[in-house]
Image (tube, rainbow, N blue to C red):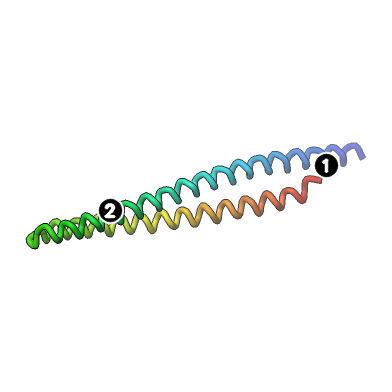
Amino acid sequence: MKKGSSAVQSGTETVQQLQTTFETIQQAAEHVSEKAKEMVDNLHMVEGQTNAVQEKTKKISSNSGKVVNEMESVSAASEEQSASAGEIATASENLSRLAQELSGSLQRFKY
């Protein structure tokens, strides 16, 4: 009987440690998600500014074909980075959701 109680106590402590660990993971995932969202916002701003500069460059000179091509490359790179950051944000949100679900499941084993 004493052995069983000891095992239950040990199991409860392990579950509590796991819960703390998953809460830490969840907090880290939420932090990464927030930073990824900030990156996406900043990249959208950069993309918008790049597009504005591109349009002004076209108006300044009709002979600026090379400059326009370079600006289009920068815009495309910004769009790619924006898409990548969006994927990171989505993955971070999914990880956070999974950590919350796991934490909820662990709550059921506490008692």
Q: Which mark is residue 94?
A: none
The answer to which image quadrant residue 53 occupies is bottom left
Image: 106 above or below 80: above
Mark count = 2
Q: Is 103 located above or below residue 76 in the figure?
A: above
Q: Which of marks 2 and 1 is in front?
A: 2
Residue 38 placement (x, y as % from top left): 43, 48
Residue type marked 1: Val
Please indicate whether residue 43 sits to the left or right of residue 55 in the image.
Answer: right
Image position, residue 20 (x, y; %): 66, 40
- Quadrant in the picture for residue 47: bottom left
Crowd tier of the residue under label 1, counting other residues whose Cα lies within 10 Å: few below 14, some 14–19, many 20 or above: few
Residue at x-position 9% and y-position 59%: 61
Q: Where residue 49 is drawn, which disc sits there? A: 2
Residue extending furthest toward the left: 63
Please provide percent x and percent y for residue 37. Answer: 45, 51
**Of label 2 and label 1, which has the lower sequence position?**
1
Residue drawn at x 68%, y 49% as measured from the top left: 103
Task: Determine the residue positioned at 72% across, 40% down.
Answer: 16
Establish if 59 lies above or below 33: below
Q: Is residue 5 left or right of residue 58?
A: right
Q: How far apart are marks 2 and 1 (CA)?
A: 61 Å
| Quarter of the image where the N terminus is located | top right
How far from the left and from the top, in percent, is residue 57? 15, 57
Asked which secondary structure carries label 1, the reply is helix
Q: Mark 1 points at which residue?
A: 8
Q: Relative to 17, is 85 on the left or the right?
A: left
Q: Mark 2: few, some, or many residues within 10 Å (few <14, many ≥20)?
A: few
Tag 2 secondary structure: helix
